[in-house]
Image (cartoon, helix red, strand yellow):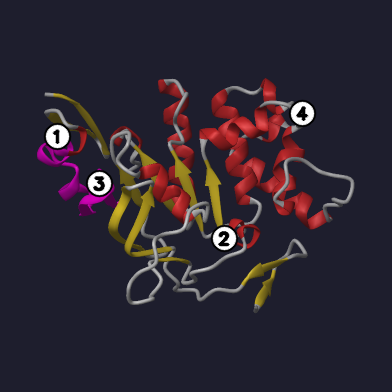
Amino acid sequence: MAHESTAAGYAAPAIAADAPVLELDRASVLRGERLILEALSLRVAAGEHTAILGANGSGKSTLVKLVTRQLYPLARDDGQPSVRVFGRERWHVAELRSLLGIVSPALQLDYTTDTPLEVFDAVVSGFYAARGLGPGHRPTPAMRERAHAALAQMGIAHLIGRDMATLSTGEARRVLIARALVHRPRALLLDEPSAGLDLATRRHFLESLRTLARGGTTLLLVTHHIEEIVPEIGRVLLLLEGKALRHGDKAQVLTDDALSDAFGMRVRVGRDGDYYSAVPA
């Protein structure tokens, strides 16, 4: 497999510059006798910030696991792959992590419980796909420089020296983004990233996502809160029972009728500047 060198002294997978971040072509996932995702198609080009929106049980978590290669789709009758990430059907997970950063509340639990873990070690150990630095891990000066830069980029360099378990939810979430950023990934997959954040912390956190989007990192936001869809996200996939209810331009998808269908109740959509909101009608 061809690789490209990086300043940090490790090899990252070589992919075409114009490779789509994600391609789903009639992807289906079966659990027991039930289709959790059914013939779902989606294409996300580089720089095409996209939100995946739906109620609990709509298939969002299954879709995340497809992208992160924790689940695999049903084989298609024609033998063609139904899921490609950065143009490839198969990945070693460690390779994929260098191109696609992942942030979620579930991942955060792994870094804030059990064995104590210092903030800088949590970030620089991202180069090894490990939780902290082990005896065989010797970060190069370039790796340490990138870790410091990622922490500074997220505005949390002052947290160095703190234990992850002592951080607020918002601080820990930004540390995880810094950990993902050490690779300078092409995209970030954000699974319910504002869960557990209060109103003020959520707004500060979303502003940091906006900065990343404007800096060239493609955002894939998975959520059931339309308030989290930052202005830079222009496209939305609305899921219902494992199927695409609507997909396209944000303004055309985030409508009263579409969200009412998706959430099973009458919903009224509003706007506050470039942000959308929804309340029961």
SS assignment at label 1: helix
Q: Residue at label 1?
A: 260
Q: Position of residue 70 (x, y in %)?
A: 52, 51
Q: Amino acid at mark 4?
A: Thr
Disc 3 crowd, CA 10 A, few/some/many (<14, 14-19, 20+): many
Disc 4 crowd, CA 10 A, few/some/many (<14, 14-19, 20+): few
The span picked out in magenta is 234-261
Q: Amino acid at mark 1?
A: Ser
Residue 119, label in figure: none
**Left-right relation of 104 to 180:** left
Disc 1 crowd, CA 10 A, few/some/many (<14, 14-19, 20+): some
Q: CA distance from mark 3 to mark 1?
A: 11 Å
Front residue of this view, candidates 25 and 252: 25
Residue 115, label in figure: 4
Q: Residue at label 2?
A: 99
Q: CA distance from mark 1 to mark 4?
A: 44 Å
Name which of mark 1 and mark 4 comes first in the sequence: 4
**Left-right relation of 73 to 173:** left
Name which of mark 1 and mark 2 comes first in the sequence: 2
**Left-right relation of 224 to 107:** left
Q: CA distance from mark 2 to mark 3?
A: 25 Å
Q: Position of residue 202 (x, y in %)?
A: 44, 28
* Image position of 29 with respect to 265: above or below: below
